[in-house]
Image (cartoon, rainbow, N blue to C red):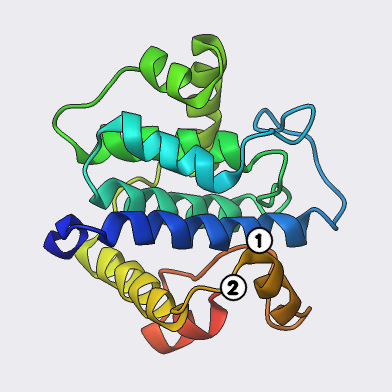
Amino acid sequence: MTELEIPNVMPKLINFLSSLLQGVAESNDLQPQKISVFNGLSRPSISIQSYLERIFKYANCSPSCYIVAYVYLDRFTQRQPSLPINSFNVHRLLITSVMVSAKFMDDMYYNNAYYAKVGGISTTEMNFLEVDFLFGLGFHLNVTPNTFHTYCSYLQREMILMQPQINIAEESILYNENSLKLHLCFNEDESPHQQQQQLAV
């Protein structure tokens, strides 16, 4: 966790998570979509990166919350395979996962009304999203140190490989059907070697 507090690490992490989620969302946009409470009527005009940067700027949660939020998104997509991350739901899934991780991880955190304002949605909608997200996770919120370390190691390795950074357009050309799965993700019940083989990107 101390590595996450080093200056410039979090902006790089935010940038990488944005690129990862954008790749996954764009891939899943090509698949048949099931409507859920997380879906917007249209694609938000704000980019995933700008949205995540906004959350980072105003949420004031601990750096580890973003790793845990990523774990939660991964768990959610595994438990809800009919609701893959796409361009219509990624923003609401992001604000909800960060808010839930902050509540679980941090001693002090903002209330739902504040997160709703940060996320550009109503407090009522934020409350509904939180409940649906928790049920979607099966209330499986605990993240063991081993799981946290595994996700950190993966993100760190991928961030290193990403340097110098390639832009999203170039990145999407490098993806093909076999290399990009429809969700993030690895199974916490499997060995690290098996986990690495299942990583989406």
**Quadrant of the snapshot with the N terminus:** bottom left
Q: Quadrant of residue 35?
A: top right
- Residue drawn 55% across the image and 39% down it: 93
Kind of element beneath mark 1: helix
117 relative to 69, above or below = above
Q: Quadrant of residue 27?
A: bottom right
The spot of residue 44 in percent (x, y) is 69, 33
14 relative to 161, above or below = above
Q: Observer-nearest residue: 101 or 160?
A: 160
Sequence-wise first label, 2 or 1: 1
Q: Which mark is residue 13?
A: none
Look at mark 1 in the image and give the residue it sits on. 24
Q: Residues within 10 Å of mark 2 (few under 14, many from 20)?
A: some
Q: Amino acid at mark 2?
A: Ala
Q: Amino acid at mark 1?
A: Val
Tell me whether circle 2 and circle 1 mark residues in contact (CB < 8 Å).
yes
Q: Position of 124 compared to 109: left or right?
A: right
**Quadrant of the snapshot with the C terminus:** bottom right
Q: Residues within 10 Å of mark 1 (few under 14, many from 20)?
A: many
Kind of element beneath mark 2: loop
Q: Is residue 100 visible in this depiction of the protein?
A: no
- Residue drawn 52% across the image and 41% down it: 50
Q: Which mark is residue 200?
A: 2
37 relative to 31, above or below = above
Q: Is residue 18 visible in this depiction of the protein?
A: yes
Instruction: Report how far apart the C-alphas of labels 2 and 1 lie in the structure.
Output: 8 Å
- Residue drawn 53% across the image and 67% down it: 185
Q: Position of 115 compared to 124: left or right?
A: left
Q: Observer-nearest residue: 192 or 91?
A: 91
The spot of residue 165 in percent (x, y) is 49, 73
The spot of residue 14 in percent (x, y) is 41, 54
- Residue drawn 69% across the image and 54% down it: 25
